[in-house]
Image (cartoon, grey):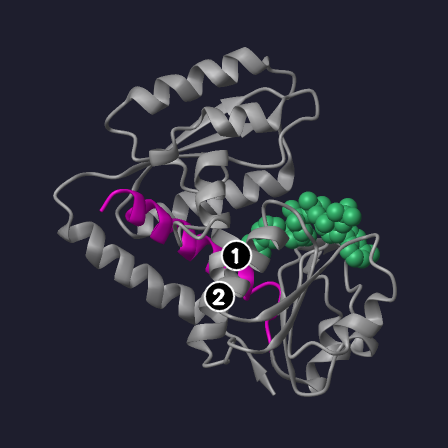
Amino acid sequence: MIIFDGKALALNIKSQVAESVKKLNKKLTLAVILIGNNPASEVYVRNKEKSCKDVGIDFELIRFSENCKQNDVIKKIKELNKKIEISGILVQLPIPNHLNEREILDTISAKKDVDCLTQENFGRLALGISDFAPCTASAVIEILKQSNIAIQGKKVVVVGRSALVGLPTQMLLTRNNATVTLCHSKTEKLKKITKKADILVVAIGKAKYITKKYVKKHSVVIDVGINRVDGKLCGDVDFENVKKKTHLITPVPGGVGQMTVAMLLKNILLLNS
Ligand code: NDP
């Protein structure tokens, strides 16, 4: 059984990005919009800031209060779109419910949409026009490829269909010739489906939901979930219960999360090279 080391691979990618940033003859700056005081978002934004700085990308944080107005956020994004010194724009999700998330994301210029969440960039991915993808979906593919896990022809089950994670992961896996089943909260007999998966990707946001009963022997389990239980981070997979049954499993923390930030840095570079 292999426990995937997200930290080591992310460090490797970061040093490649740092090299490429050095070779570019322009300065890169990521602008992050953070709305409200979600403690988890604060942590994720701090990690992104540190990672950007580690590879020589400047970082600008723009804060809005929890009860901010839609128009003020839109106005700010339009300003950032125009600034040539801003190379990428990211709105940290989730945002408060009173705001129209789709309108906010679609205001970001596709050329600066480092999360690949605008209709334009997401649509290009869906149509197979581009490989540019949301960071977590790219992270899942990178983990499989770097771990020498064959994707082509394999039965892959993705649990969770959000536009942020599950859906683009399914699209990228299909592009890599896997046979993918996409499951969600209305899926019947989930266990029966996941038990057939050569590769199981879980992104549901339910702590330790996936136990060994859901997992095929010697399969690959990619745990995207990040949950906090009694002050400790854990995934959607019951790691201790499942790990012995797998060929490879990603831990939480130290798995997909580390790789997602590394892929964000790669996306910033991709949009600016
Ligand atoms: P969402 O809440 O947007 O989506 C959750 C998905 O899981 C939905 O499609 C939902 O189905 C499905 N679901 C919920 N419960 C079940 C269940 N019991 N059985 C089957 N499907 C279920 O979450 P996100 O996709 O944004 O995030 C998922 C998890 O991944 C979270 O823990 C989040 O923190 C984490 N995350 C981790 C990242 C990383 O870098 N590691 C990056 C982004 C997110 P339905 O559509 O029917 O409601």
Q: Name the chief secondary structure element in magenta.
A: helix
Amino acid of disc 2: Ile
Tally of marks: 2
Image point 15% across, 47% down: which residue?
24
Please say if 175 is above or below 132: below
- Magenta range is 249-273
Q: In which quarter of the image is residue 68?
A: top right
Q: Is residue 231 visible?
A: no
| Residue 260 x/y as whole percent | 49, 55
Image point 51% across, 60% down: which residue?
172
Residue 137 disc label: 1
Q: Name the residue under label 2.
A: 141
List the single residue furthest toward the right: 189
Query: Real-space Cα distance between discs 1 and 2?
Result: 7 Å
| Residue 127 x/y as whole percent | 47, 48
| Residue 150 x/y as whole percent | 50, 80
Amino acid of disc 1: Ala
Instruction: Report if residue 79 lies within the magenta region.
Output: no
Image point 70% across, 26% down: which residue?
97
Please say if 210 is above or below 217: above
